[in-house]
Image (cartoon, rainbow, N blue to C red):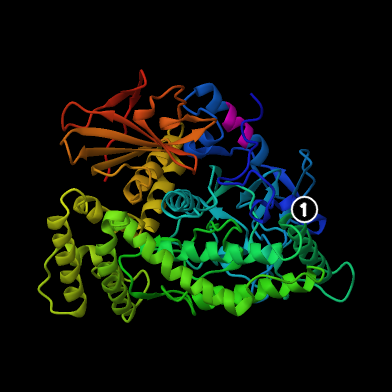
Amino acid sequence: MNRPVDVGADGAAQGRSFSSLMLQDLGPDLFAAFPARALTGARIVWLNARWFARQGVDLSCPTAAEEVRRDLLERFAVEAAPQGSPADSSGVTLSADRYGGSTGSFFGGSGRCAVRGDFNIKGIGRTPLAASRIDWDHRHGHLWLPEALREAICSEVALAELPWGGVPSIAIIDVGETIEDPEDPKPELFRRRALMIRPNFVRPAHFERSLYFGSAGARASEQFLDAERTRGAVEAAGRIAGEGAALFDAIDAMFLRFAGQVGAARANKLWSGRFMSPNVSITGGLADFGIFRAVPNWRGLTGIPGERLGQDLPHLATSIRSIYYYARKYAQGRRGGLGEEPLIRAVEVEIEAAFMRTLMAGLGVDGPAHAELRGRLTPLLRRFYELQQRHVMRANSPEAEASPCLHEHLTEKRSESSGLEALAQSMRRLIDEHNAASPAHPVNLPNMHRWLAPRPSLYHVRLTQGVEAVAREVAVADETAEAIATAFIDRMVGLSRRTWPLLPTGFEIRGVGYRAGSAALHVKDVRTGRRGVWIECPMAGGAPYPFGRPLASVPQAEMQVGDDHRAMLYAPLDDDEWPKGVTIAGEYFELPALVA
């Protein structure tokens, strides 16, 4: 087998197009090199079984898993060498990628991430592109183990629940060092150093300037290099996008992907704060999960200044104007696309459309038989959202996390007399009327309520408490550290999943378990009453990988195949009990415990 870690990001396009741009395409001025040194005592504490299965690597094989661990540590267990430190015998040189931002930026690019080959190491230490004026959390360039656990969980949830997913974490390395600093503004948090490995990705910010970083006035200055790398990035994107207006058409398509992602996340009550061009991939996926969280409802939650749930358009508009400006400046006279203001209007329309599409799919009323019901529910849902948006609350506050959501209004006949309760009563009546009139195509109420249910395990405060506790446990564990971290991440992903696009209609979900990159759904066939198991798993080379293990031949009747490298496998059950395992295509698979 070739080196086990040598492939690119989830969802990468096979042909060359704007969305398949790689960092290496963007020109030699993109990278700032710096010396690094090998870390001793580092260890793997998590491997992303789903991602490795997508690459055709069977981590259930102990030999293959150990080879992956050795390869990861050999290549990525490194840190930036402190300025003035003695030379390291390993002679490692890393690169940080330059990028800017839609309002200028005080950093020069990746301040704590390094590029090595096709991958990105987060938590490497302070790079030459780190800002001189920066908060304590980013000043040193470290990534903490609780942060890495959070990103692993949230990136897997985003990949499964959102249309454009996110940049995956493929592994977490425990550096083995705990930091105590008297200047730490939050000394109660666990400062255990970690490294997180991700595939490289291109950000919209790679096409924007960093106007406030570094020196200026000379050809070797940071500002001159930044202008050159922006020019090189736009020119490279133009060559790959195609002739004429193709670059601007690609930019328009990119922002419409962002709009679809924002609308779908809003419907799912998943929030990553305000839109920022450095924190997303040009494919549409999220790339930074530091403040990603579930929220209980659609109230106007506020975060940092200028950040409010539901107020995404102004931030998207700022990025649209910025990207268009640099594309026109450096695209050698090319013109095209919708133009800034028409694109902003199109983005606004797409956010709303994606919000309603996702809501209807989640409620299970997106089929042809539900067209009339969908038309009657749409204005009620829109009005419900608008009323909740009027209530402004501080994000992460106990009041915000305890406030009721649509799920509670639909499942409980609340005594309060309010516009929200009146709307919920109208929705319940419409659904009941549809189910009475269309017994062949009813709304699956248990699945609808399961999709609408809050995800309290992903609320910011609760998730922070969880990753802090598990990080402390991992730090003191010996050979069980990886098992502890893996079980925790699997449990959190299982608790947080709501969307199953490949699940055939007519099955009621009774429970969910998750292990090794695969989800097991305990289901009931609503037509026959028979119980069964659907297993959602990755695919590679045409073969499904349930729980990370390849399955060579599956009867067509027992498998649903998606267009996003996922499959679902079916196994009938003899009774209502959740079994220890099932046999599919002649092979036995142990099932995870149900967590939701």
Q: Residue at x 42, y 33 (%)?
A: 480
Q: Which residue is mark 1?
A: 34
Q: Position of residue 147 (x, y in %)?
A: 49, 54
Q: Residue at the location (65% across, 51% down)? A: 20
Task: Tell me if residue 571 can be seen.
Answer: yes
406 vs 113, left or right, is left
| Residue type beneath disc 1 | Phe
Q: Secondary structure at mark 1?
A: strand
Q: Locate residue 300, reporting x and y percent.
A: 36, 76
Q: Nearer the viewer, residue 93 or 197?
A: 197
Residue occupying the point 83% across, 75% down: 216
Question: Which region of the structure is painted magenta?
Answer: 67-72
Q: Is residue 269 visible?
A: no
Toward the top, the furthest residue is 586
Image-quadrant location for residue 311: bottom left
Residue 279 picture quarter: bottom right
**Residue 69's spot in the image, x, y percent?**
57, 32
Residue 182: x and y, percent? 54, 64
Does the magenta segment cover residue 68?
yes
Tell me where residue 205 sits by quadrant: bottom right
Residue at (20, 33) in percent of width and height: 531
Q: Nearer the viewer, residue 140 or 506?
A: 506
Taking depth in this image into account, of 166 and 146 the one nearest to the observer is 166
